[in-house]
Amino acid sequence: MTDSTQKRIAIFGSTGSIGTQALDVIKANPDKFSAEILTAQTNAELLIAQAKAFDPNVVVIGDDTKYAMVKEALADTQVKVFAGEQALVEAAAMDCYDMMLASIVGYAGLKPTLKAVEMGKAIGLANKETLVVAGDIVMQKAAQNKTPILPVDSEHSAIFQCLVGEMRNPIERIILTASGGPFRGKKPNFLVNVKRDHALQHPNWSMGAKITIDSATLMNKGLEMIEAKWLFGLKPSQIEVVIHPQSIIHSMVQFEDGSMKAQMGLPDMKLPIQYAMAFPERIKNDFPRLDFRRCEQLTFEEPDLRTFRNLALAIEALQKGGNLPCIMNAANEIAVWAFLRNRIGFLDMMAVVEQAMQKVSFIEKPTLDDYFESDAAAREFAASLIHL
Ligand code: NAD
Ligand code: MG
């Protein structure tokens, strides 16, 4: 049920870590938000439960073998049920919502998000891979259609919050903070033996499997540097990374007078999610507060680019541009998939990404179709290395 004062939210990837937290925000603020579209890839049980609880207009189950199950479970409701990859893009084109929360993981988020951008819908962007793969095209379409893109990634939300009221003041540089993940300070002789269950233990954040592995390899920070370039229109040289293990400062901006702003708080994704959903408003909540008397120290160190080669590779992709970030992302998705299934080791992930970046043809000014083809070529090459 919707009334005209509510913002109608479409959560693409509603069964994931970000998606379920976005539903918590909606549940806590029923006067402000309603859930109109919910989508999931395979978790039909949770999607059904969410649909019963939130009474959306539409649900999409990506895995079409689960269509009958979802349809039947929701037979006595008004919820419309669709299935398959194309249905995600069709749902993104619907009139029934105001804002898309783009919280699908990986390249799979690109096409529905791009459709929403073309429709001029506001986007709450968690799916950083969309900008890594095709940031130039996404941002160009957003400008053409006056589509607001509001970052959900905590670092980019921090920067966005620091920029409120500063629209006329150029940025000199931004500093993305990184926790360093579970293997901060470790060297290759340790990492070579790391297994998936250890890599899935993140010290500060509880997140989906793919981003948790990306955090352990520092690929996540590399993806975020590229995401920041597109979101804030920066040159690669303006984007820096510092390791800050406590994850209290979520990122910083330095202006041309040398003044620096930081956004701080306890690590909790619900805050950037609700900030994007309610922008420019801030919503009162009862999330735990940061208490400086209890946070003994805030420390900072240089990232170890030799050990965590993924970050060095991402910096190369950021600098060279073209389809190189797209190639890197695709190879990384295959490598993480294989690591999560114990098919390759921790350090092998970085080797797969590096080789794909060397071997798949570079295109300086790719079209959208070039990006689709580069993604497919890099996946195929990475899979051949792993003998999938
Ligand atoms: P997740 O794995 O927990 O959830 C992913 C969601 O996407 C699920 O709803 C799943 O059904 C759906 N999905 C997966 N594969 C799909 C496919 N092929 N087609 C359609 N839908 C598919 O992931 P997450 O941790 O919630 O992350 C989502 C996105 O948000 C990622 O891009 C991640 O980098 C970004 N992000 C997450 C966090 C976090 O705290 N989890 C923080 C910052 C950014
Ligand atoms: Mg982040």
Image (spheres, rainbow, N blue to C red):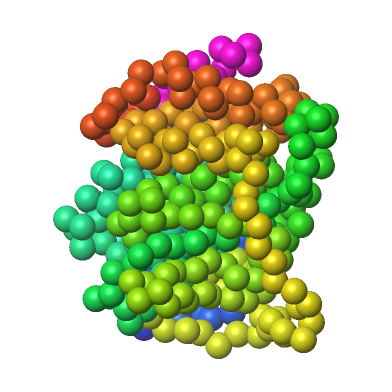
The quadrant of the picture occupied by the C terminus is top right
Asked if 359 appears above or below 164 in the picture, the reply is above
Viewer-proximal residue, 95 or 184?
A: 184
Q: Is residue 233 left or right of residue 60?
A: left
Quick one: which residue is furthest to the left in this view? 144
Which residue is painted at 55% across and 32% down in the image? Answer: 332
Kindly indicate the quadrant of the structure image that contains residue 137: top left
> Where is 257 relative to 141, above or below?
below
Task: Residue 340 in the image: state x and y as whole percent.
Answer: 71, 33
What is the number of callouts on the image? 0
Residue 230 visible, this orientation: no
Residue in front for this viewpoint, 341 or 232:
232
* Residue at the spot 65% in from the left edge and 63% down from the top edge: 300
- Residue 194 spot, x, y in % from top left: 80, 34
Per the rendered image, the range of residues in magenta is 375-388
Give coordinates of residue 237: x percent, y percent: 38, 51
Q: Judge whether 255 appears above or below 228 on screen.
A: below
Do we see residue 300 in this rendering? yes
Left or right of 342: which side holds 149? left
Identify the residue at horizontal 41%, vertical 18% (top origin): 360
- Please state which of residues 234 and 90 is positioned toward the viewer in this rendering: 234
The picture quadrant where one finds residue 52 is: bottom right
Q: Position of residue 362 (x, y in %)?
A: 34, 23
Q: Would you say 213 lies left or right of 88 here?
A: right
Q: Is residue 381 magenta?
A: yes
